[in-house]
Amino acid sequence: MLRALCGADDQALAADLRDVDLKSGDMLYEPDYLVEWVYFPQTAVLSVVTVMADGRAVESDTVGCESVVGVLAALASSEPTSRTFTQIPGVATRLSAAKLRQRADFSAHFRRLLVRHCLANLAQAHQSVACNALHSVNQRLCRWLLMSQDRTASDVVQLTHQYLAFMVGVQRTTITGALRDLAAADLIRIGRRRIEILDRPRMELRACECYGAVQANLERLIGDVPSSS
């Protein structure tokens, strides 16, 4: 998104943008707390989840270098409705919510850009709802691994089975079985806290239609699709 800023917006915001290192599990937003910063991931990958009363949570959105988190709550000076935390550690650029509101009030170009990115993130959340309801665990796991590879540009996803189970919304034993199925088909190699993708084309064939739909929405709305290359 930062690459898409026009010259005037880039110049106006440059002095207020700061790079920060995010560790795995760092909490950026919680419901009922005002948003003070918006984050533009660079190498970090962020997860937006809905938390139930019993503590269970389901991921609705994965955001990496293609977009931004916290925009709608920041523009509305409001609290977020979901939890957002660092899924894969790395660098993000942050901007104060106050500065974002100030520039959005002044610049129609910046305001339109923010809205398009919010629409892309919302479209991914809607797709995730359909995916969790209609598609198998193996299909959802393939989609999630492909999206993670796109946003890190690495063949290795460094996460535990427990964390993957949380992301996909199933029990740890279920995700372990799904990973073994993919490993038996020589699509991935499983290591300690790491999963190496060996055959991306075949994994794309196993993933559900939601992976392609999310990529198409990103291309249509923001024209900047994350790529594993």
Image (cartoon, helix red, strand yellow):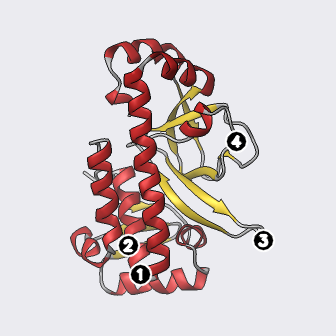
Marks 4 and 3, Cα distance to the nearest angstrom? 21 Å
**Labels 3 & 1 near each other (Cβ < 8 A):** no
Left or right, 131 with reference to 166:
left
- Element type where label 1 sits in the image: helix
In front: label 4 or label 2: 4
Q: Amino acid at mark 1?
A: Asn
Q: Residues within 10 Å of mark 1 (few under 14, many from 20)?
A: many
Marks 3 and 1, Cα distance to the nearest angstrom? 26 Å
Image quadrant where residue 20 sits? top right
Marks 2 and 1, Cα distance to the nearest angstrom? 6 Å
**Labels 4 & 2 near each other (Cβ < 8 A):** no
Residue 90, x across and y down, in percent: 50, 43
Label 3 or label 1, whichever comes before in sequence order: 3
Q: Which mark is residue 79?
A: 4
Q: Amino acid at mark 3?
A: Asp
Q: Is any part of residue 112 visible from this angle?
A: yes
Toward the left, the furthest residue is 201
Which residue is identified by label 2?
142
- Element type where label 3 sits in the image: loop
Which residue is identified by label 1?
138
Image quadrant where residue 215 sits? bottom left
In front: label 1 or label 4: 4
Image quadrant where residue 208 sits? bottom left
Residue at the spot 40% in from the left edge and 87% down from the top edge: 181
Q: Which mark is residue 54?
A: 3
Residue at the spot 72% in from the left edge and 37% down from the top edge: 34
Label 2 or label 3, whichever comes before in sequence order: 3
Q: Residues within 10 Å of mark 3 (few under 14, many from 20)?
A: few
**Labels 2 & 1 near each other (Cβ < 8 A):** yes
